[in-house]
Image: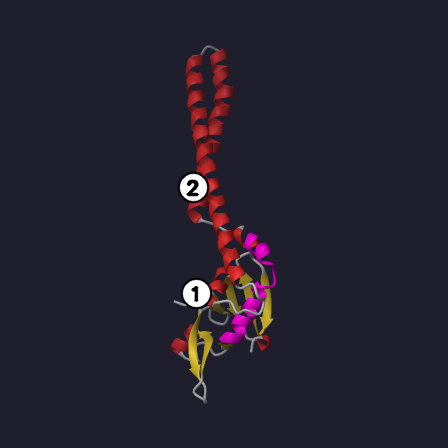
């Protein structure tokens, strides 16, 4: 599967673009990108979708990525690492930590008041507090482990991005489609332009006559 095949979107019908190969009159092959809906169901289904020639498109995307310094871009993009499992676990642990803190505050306020009134034994309150503090420390350690894991993943991603960019350090070197897919979030194809969004939420537009 082509690494860009799930990133280029037709604004007319919402379908993904698909790579195809044209044969010119001189028998030369030319790769292009076309709306998959139109390719499958015909022009009547999506009459206004445009065809993108692959080489000028890849050249334009390469120039876009090379517009920043390699380290700057790698640092920016690594900040957008969003591993779902770590995020969900942290949210769950933070909720549990908030509940434990509420229990501790309640014990310190209401519990000690009950002790003062002779309604509850102080040793029971202290035992319960000790359990809460122990649970709190455990939760904080688990959160720290997740933070360490996240930072390690972010560092690894930054190194991977730098490696990719260093491999293409010459501004006039054409990056592979695999390289470009690392940085491009999506490309929306309209009648007269394409809208490009990178994974760090940077957006730009290119007129179709600039990549024809």
How crowded pointer 2 is (Cα within 10 Å; few <14, some 14-19, many 20+) is rated as some
Q: Could you say which quadrant of the image residue 29 lies in?
A: bottom left
The relative height of residue 42 versus residue 177 in the rendered view (above or below) is below
Q: Is residue 59 magenta?
A: yes
Name the image colouring: secondary structure
Q: How far apart are marks 1 and 2 (CA)?
A: 30 Å
Q: Does the magenta stretch include residue 58?
A: yes
Residue at image mark 2: 89
The residue nearer to you, when weighing 54 against 166, is 166
How crowded pointer 1 is (Cα within 10 Å; few <14, some 14-19, many 20+) is rated as few
> Which element carries disc 1, helix, strand or loop?
loop
Residue span colored magenta: 53-75
Quadrant of the image for the N terminus?
bottom left
The relative height of residue 85 versus residue 40 in the rendered view (above or below) is above
Q: Which residue lies furthest to the bottom in this view?
A: 25
Q: Which residue lies furthest to the top in this view?
A: 118
Residue 171 percent location from the top left of the image: 58, 67
> Which element carries disc 2, helix, strand or loop?
helix
Residue 120 at least partly seen: no
Residue 101 percent location from the top left of the image: 49, 28
Instruction: Give me the disc on residue 3.
Output: 1
Quadrant of the image for the C terminus?
bottom right
Residue 162 at least partly seen: yes
The residue nearer to you, when weighing 117 against 156, is 156
Task: Give the dominant element type of the magenta stretch: helix, strand or loop.
Answer: helix
The residue nearer to you, when weighing 47 against 133, is 133
Residue 112 percent location from the top left of the image: 49, 16
């Amino acid at each position: 599967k082509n690494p860009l095949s799930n990133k280029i979107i037709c604004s007319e019908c919402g379908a993904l673009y698909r790579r195809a190969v044209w044969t010119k009159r001189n028998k030369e092959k030319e790769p292009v990108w076309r709306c998959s809906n139109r390719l499958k169901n015909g022009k009547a289904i999506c009459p206004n979708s445009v065809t993108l020639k692959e080489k000028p498109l890849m050249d334009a995307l390469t120039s876009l990525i090379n517009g920043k310094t390699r380290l700057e871009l790698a640092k920016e993009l690594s900040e957008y690492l969003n591993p779902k499992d770590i995020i969900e676990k942290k949210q769950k642990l933070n909720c549990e930590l908030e509940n434990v803190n509420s229990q501790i505050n309640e014990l310190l306020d209401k519990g000690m008041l009950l002790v003062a009134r002779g309604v509850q034994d102080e040793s029971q309150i202290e035992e319960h507090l000790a359990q809460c503090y122990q649970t709190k420390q455990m939760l904080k350690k688990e959160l720290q482990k997740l933070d360490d894991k996240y930072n390690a993943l972010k560092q690894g991603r930054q190194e991977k991005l730098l490696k990719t960019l260093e491999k293409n350090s010459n501004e006039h070197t054409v990056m592979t489609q695999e390289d470009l897919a690392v940085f491009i979030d999506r490309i929306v194809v309209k009648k007269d332009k394409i809208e490009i969004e990178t994974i760090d939420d940077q957006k730009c537009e290119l007129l179709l006559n600039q990549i024809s």
